[in-house]
Amino acid sequence: MSKIEFKDVTFSYSQSGKNTIVNNMSCSFDSNMLTIVTGKSGCGKSTVLYLAAGIYPQYSGVLHSGTVLIDGKESSTLSPEKRCSIVGMMFQNPDLQFCMDTVENEILFCLGNIGIPREKMKEIINYALNFCDIAHLRNRRLQSLSGGEKQKAMLSCLIALNPQWLLLDEPFANVDEKSAKELVQKIHKLHKKGVGILVVDHRLDYWLQIADEIRLMNRENGIVQTNYIPEDISDKMMIKIENTKNIEKNETILQLNNLTVSRNENTILNKVNFEFERNKIYFIIGESGSGKSTLFGTISGLYKYEGDILLKGKNIKKRKNYKAGMIGFVTQSPQDQFVSNTVLEEIELGLKIRSSNKDVQKEAESILREIDLWKYRNFSPYMLSQGQQRRLGVASLLAYDCEILICDEPTYAQDSDNTVSIMNALINKAKERGMTLIISTHDLKLAKYYAEVIIELKEGKLYEYSKSSI
Amino acid sequence: MNTLNPVFKLLGILIPTFLLAAFHNPILNIIVFVICIILMLLSKVSFKRLFLLMLPILLVAVGMFFTGYHFQVQEGAPVNPDSLDLTNNAIWNGMIFSSRVLAYAGLGFLFVLTTNKMELIRSFQQQLHLPPIFAYGLLAAWNIFPNIMEEYKKTRAAFRARGVNTFAISPALLKPMLVKAVLWSEALAIAMESKGFNSNAKRTEYYVMKTTLKDLIFPVTTTIGLLFIQNLILRHINLIL
């Protein structure tokens, strides 16, 4: 049995030791327990994982005191080729973890790193690919894989490296439900073979069946030792399902006529016809890869399309009809939308354009306090944690006066408190201003609770659902 | 051409490239160009692809021809015997310029279209002992390159969604792009190290880039061949004159 131990660890991202992320934390993880660490966004979960993997403080931040030990050895002092046989890590963003062109070459690269003799390589690759059921992807280019396939390819690299511990940082952030479930099964199988598993995630539903323990982390006390057992949690951290609302017909604001979009020779949207009405809340559901982000990208002018998109009855193919700012976007990856140097400026920008109001500063302050980011007002948006970035992304567009607000997965990587506060803020502002909200999500419960109209995107078409049928 | 060791192929193409710069001989240039095209077609480079790639080059070649044609050194200008053919006549002068474009394009395409970049980098690493940190760093950077254009478009759309209009190369766009470039490179470096990559450690390679006699002969042949043809042409011209 192997152990990861934190002894009196204090860590912060600045030399001065202000804003410590982890404060005098002591805890340990056993390799025979499959452990999930969860907690509020920004509480330092990912940091703990990076410390255990030996990536911090080498790459970022300062370890002010304490040690992180794996089997009594300090992981950050080991050289990479030795460290990777002890601890492997799977990251949030599947795009930024490969350095070769094909799946096979990537695994060969890993094996080369640790000096596996040439004649043994084929055998190990076959084993790793078969373990993940991706033998058919062997010679595929990594760039052409979907998010789920990329994570499977990454897992097969880690299997080839054969570490004692596998650390996962929200591995399903860009993965559809089906692939996520498959991956969970593989990870479980790996655990049974004796690999220690430590996962950081907000969404617990995938893990509940296989987890041995779930630990809650918060900023003040570090990781709380009293463990929850999976059975206790179930729906407590998820959103309750409630009423349905009756709504009348409103004026059409955005109309899609025979919208067809192809990317890389695949038809992603096929003659989509739909009318979005003013002052309504739409949820778009559908598996990842079904084209939700493509639909949004097309409306924002990123992709070429056939057919028409009418905004208030005017075709947006003509550029003059597409007034900047009529449609606001909250992008899937929040980093894609930041335009300012600091968190405060990010909010003020929208407020300044909207009105000549002199109370911009006061209003910005109240918005930032509401989303709990006021203490970070002078930070660069890129320095916030994933969850905080997403909150800022939503808030900065709410500060802006658009008529349609499109949100791509606005509540991903948020705990239930933040999910509720984001959704409430979105819906209150939308109703106050008569905005149309179009939100995509993987989370059916969320859609059922908040939506006025639920649409499913399937095989390139949009289907409207009655809420009771979901 | 596809089976040659990339480093030796590069040498066999680079040496003639430098030599060509010293000669002002359109016939030689055109012969080089034709040989390159034949070699490419023999190496199963798609004709359509080659044709499309050559289109802009042809345009430049025509442009260069007229440049040389109109701007030759006029009679009465100080002339030395070495550059006699430069001043001989306008057409000859134009030919020198345009055929040079063709010869260089031919050599360049010959290398690019018959070489796999993975093999090239492996070969750099194994034959020229390029440190692995450069080799794999280059590959990693190369493989995220397609994301950059996508990122640029996204950034622009983000600005527009916030009511900020930007022009194509607005400096405002550069800032988020640069920040992302830094974040990406850090994430990639972390991912590579977490897979055990260490530039100082001894590593094993699955693909061994072999050097055969054929690979050694190639650069020698191209160099001697070029000099031989040049000599032959000069002799003929002298005979005509």
Image (cartoon, rainbow, N blue to C red):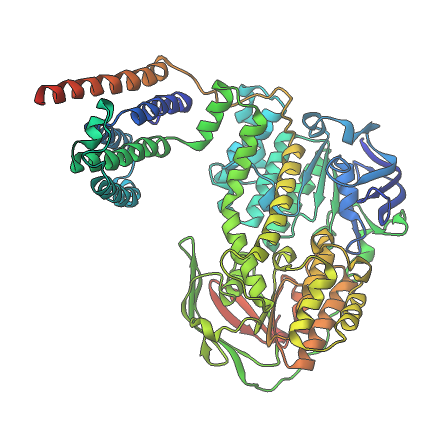
In the rendered image of this protein, does residue A257 appear above or below residue A88? below
* Count of numbered marks: 0
In the rendered image of this protein, does residue A282 appear above or below residue B66? below
Q: Position of residue A223 (x, y in %)?
A: 86, 47
Q: Position of residue A389 (x, y in %)?
A: 70, 57
Q: Residue at x 54, y 71 (%)?
A: A324
| Residue B72 is at least partly visible in this image | yes
| Residue A151 is at least partly visible in this image | no
The quadrant the C terminus of chain A occupies is bottom right
The quadrant the N terminus of chain A occupies is top right
Q: Position of residue A220 (x, y in %)?
A: 89, 52
B190 to the left or right of A200? left
Q: Residue at x 38, y 14 (%)?
A: B212
Q: Please, which residue is most extreme toward the top here?
A: B213
A159 to the left or right of A383? left
In the rendered image of this protein, does residue A24 appear above or below residue B76? below
Quick one: B189 or B180, which is closer to the camera? Answer: B180
Q: Quadrant of residue B88?
A: top left
Quick one: B25 or A193, which is closer to the camera? Answer: B25
Q: Residue at x 41, y 16 (%)?
A: B211
Q: Position of residue A161 (x, y in %)?
A: 64, 30
Quick one: B83 or B44, which is closer to the camera? Answer: B83
In the rendered image of this protein, does residue B216 appear above or below residue A417? above
A45 to the left or right of B52? right
